[in-house]
Image: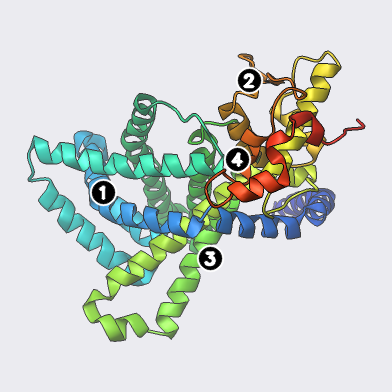
Amino acid sequence: MIAAMTTHERARQHGRLHFIESWLPGLLQSLGHFPWRITALTLRQRFRDDRLGITAGSLTFTTTISLVPLFTVGLAIFSAFPMFGRMQAQLQQWLIQSLIPDQIARQVSNYLLQFSQQAGKMGWAGAVFLLVTALTLVLTIDRKLNDIWRVRQPRSLAQRVLIYWAVLTLGPLLLGASLSLSSYAVSASRGWVSAVPGGVKLALDAVEFLLGLAGMAALYRFVPNAPVRWAHAFAGALLAAAGIELGKRVLGWYLVQVPTYSAVYGAFATVPILLIWLYTGWVIVLLGAVLTAYLPSLVGGIARRSDAPGWDLQLALELLACLHQARSEGRRGCSLESIAQQLRVDPLQLEPPLEALEALDWIGRLSEEDGRHVLLVDPAATPLAPLLQALCLPLADGTQALWQASGWPRLKLAEVLPQRTH
């Protein structure tokens, strides 16, 4: 019997090794062909150009203000359902183990519990204020993520409120369900598999990481009012989840090795440490969003990228040339994806020139599912000056002499459009 079991286990191990040996080369080849250098440069450029540091600071402030309302709303939802009445202690334990470094998690958890208990004594007016404050955070997240995706028409306020109201109500319940399963698994493992507690802990940590990964992927998939593939959302979520876990461990190691904050601030040290961690966490989340937004172009091998002055003007002229060529060939416009492919740029880079050209009424977008753009003006009869003022140099008292000497007011759009051979 033992020999048979041993043979069976060996066969299973051999099968696992064969699967890994057949799957690992493909994975390594895909990782080897991934444009890591361009990705790093894109993350750095977008962090600077989109001012993600300032955005992370804004979200840190909003999060600090909204922590107590969010915690209070979560506990209120738990208390409304008797089946989750015992989940409050587990919620605090999950907060200690998962959200922030262990060095400050217990103090933060105790403070939040005390504040939420005091907030529970407020009347209806106070409850409405707490709810509005909690929604302020999620609406801020919505606005910032849509900025990263260059969304020009966000969802209506009513749609956003309904979506995030569902998040605020269903989120704690799903968390309670997952905590119930984890608690059941832990209690069961003590009686049935007590010989391998390390493996059980590793499995629960993996489940916890996967839950965070799924939540982050859902954030990147559903919050932006733009089409996002699940594969790209999970790739960005993997960067964010792994970065948060690494950042939590690095900050915890630093606080142990260099106890500067505790020595200087004493009992007040929890506050600056919490702010530093919130800022770091939001920077990681925003970088994950940038990776998700630009991953299609990174994988597709976009060759052109620039932050030089006049880049938007150059893209606007090339975009107009594409649409002019499409009209001369009898085609009914071009989609944003096809224009980006022809110009070898990321579709998100075309959003600023598209916005400027639509504001001038030089191009329009057909009311179709593919969202094709068409040229609305005659380049031979359209002066170039409005486009130059919108994207290059406004006409003012200090620039009037330059405008007259350069001859720009006399130029027509057809005279400066780049010639396309394909």
Location of residue 300 in the rendering, given as x and y in whole percent from the top left corner: 78, 42
Label drawn at residue 246: 3
Label drawn at residue 389: 4
Residue shown at 32% from the left, 32% from the top? 165
Label drawn at residue 365: 2
Local crowd size for mark 3, using a 10 Å CA cut-off: few (<14), some (14–19), many (≥20): few
Considering only vertical position in the picture, is 296 above or below 11? above
Query: What separation in Å lies between label 1 and label 3 (alpha carbons)?
Result: 25 Å
Residue shown at 86% from the left, 17% from the top? 329
Q: 415 and 189: which one is in front?
A: 415
Q: 367 and 18: which one is in front?
A: 367
Judge depth for marks 1 and 2 and give the one in front.
Answer: 2
Dot placed on the residue nearer the N-terminal end, 1 or 3:
1
Dot placed on the residue nearer the N-terminal end, 1 or 2:
1
Dot placed on the residue nearer the N-terminal end, 2 or 3:
3
Q: What is the residue that sits farthest to the right in this orientation?
A: 421
- Secondary structure beneath label 1: helix
Query: What separation in Å lies between label 2 and label 3 (alpha carbons)?
Result: 44 Å
* Circles 4 and 2 in contact, beta carbons < 8 Å: no
Q: 308 and 274: which one is in front?
A: 308
Label drawn at residue 71: 1
